[in-house]
Amino acid sequence: MEDTGLSRTGGRELFVVGAGFSAVELAGWAGESGWNVAGLVELLDPARIGTSVGGYEVVDAATLPEGAYAVSADGRYHDRREAWTLAERRRCRGATLVHPGAHVAASATIAPGAIVGPFAVIGAWAEIGEHVLVSRGVLIGHNVTIQPFARVRPGANLAGHVEVGADATIAMGAVVTDHVSIGERALVAAGAVVVRDVPATTRVQGVPARPFEA
């Protein structure tokens, strides 16, 4: 099995791709999980390189050590998939970051680069794809499949047999009922209750959730 740094022994170095508030929060989770956070990777403002944010050094992606472990933070102003390409240029490896306060069923699988925050629950036979973000307090039911780079934000609740497509976003406090599919790059707004499939790139909100235009 590929070494993704899941073991919390050894205090391995980890870089967080991003340098905003979400990156600082993620760096805190990483430290609580036994990682030594070596820096936050600035994506937007070169003037910030060499400064400190939240006690963490801000570094340039071009200076990342080849083969280093890294995870991609959430962010309002950058795309997590595009951000990860900067780390890939340095041949960085996606770390598997599971906070010690989370509960992950023994039969669940967590792919490289995925992040599981504090108080999250990952149910039996769930499959969490590469670079998926499962934020704090999220409930993932049994047999849920989440494709790469999807984001499940704080307090969301996904029932059993839900499928979430790549790059989709389930916003804060949203509920997705069982056997529902959320398409690629779809957005489920905060507090929505989804009771039927959401097509790719569609945005839904409300109770029950219905499509809306941004």
Image (cartoon, helix red, strand yellow):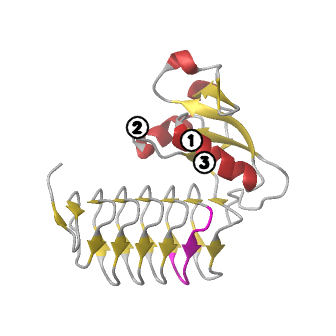
Q: Dot 2: what SS? A: loop
- What x and y, as percent, mark residue 200? 23, 62
Q: Which residue is mark 1?
A: 23
Q: CA distance from mark 1 to mark 2?
A: 12 Å
Residue 42 vs residue 97: left or right?
left
Residue 26: mark: 3
Three-letter residue code for mark 3: Leu
Q: Are marks 3 and 1 in contact (CB under 8 Å)?
A: yes
Crowdedness near tag 1: few (<14), some (14–19) or many (≥20) residues, C-alpha within 10 Å: many
Residue 88 visible? The answer is no
Q: Residue at left 49%, top 75%?
A: 140
Q: Which residue is mark 2?
A: 78
Three-letter residue code for mark 1: Ala
Q: CA distance from mark 3 to mark 1?
A: 5 Å
Q: Dot 3: what SS? A: helix
Q: Dot 1: what SS? A: helix
Residue 64: mark: none
Stretch in magenta: 118-126
Q: CA distance from mark 3 to mark 2?
A: 16 Å
Three-letter residue code for mark 2: His
Crowdedness near tag 2: few (<14), some (14–19) or many (≥20) residues, C-alpha within 10 Å: few
Q: Residue at left 22%, top 66%?
A: 206
Residue 128 vs residue 112: left or right?
left
Q: Nearer the viewer, residue 7 or 190?
A: 190
- What x and y, as percent, mark residue 204? 22, 63
Residue 3 visible? The answer is yes
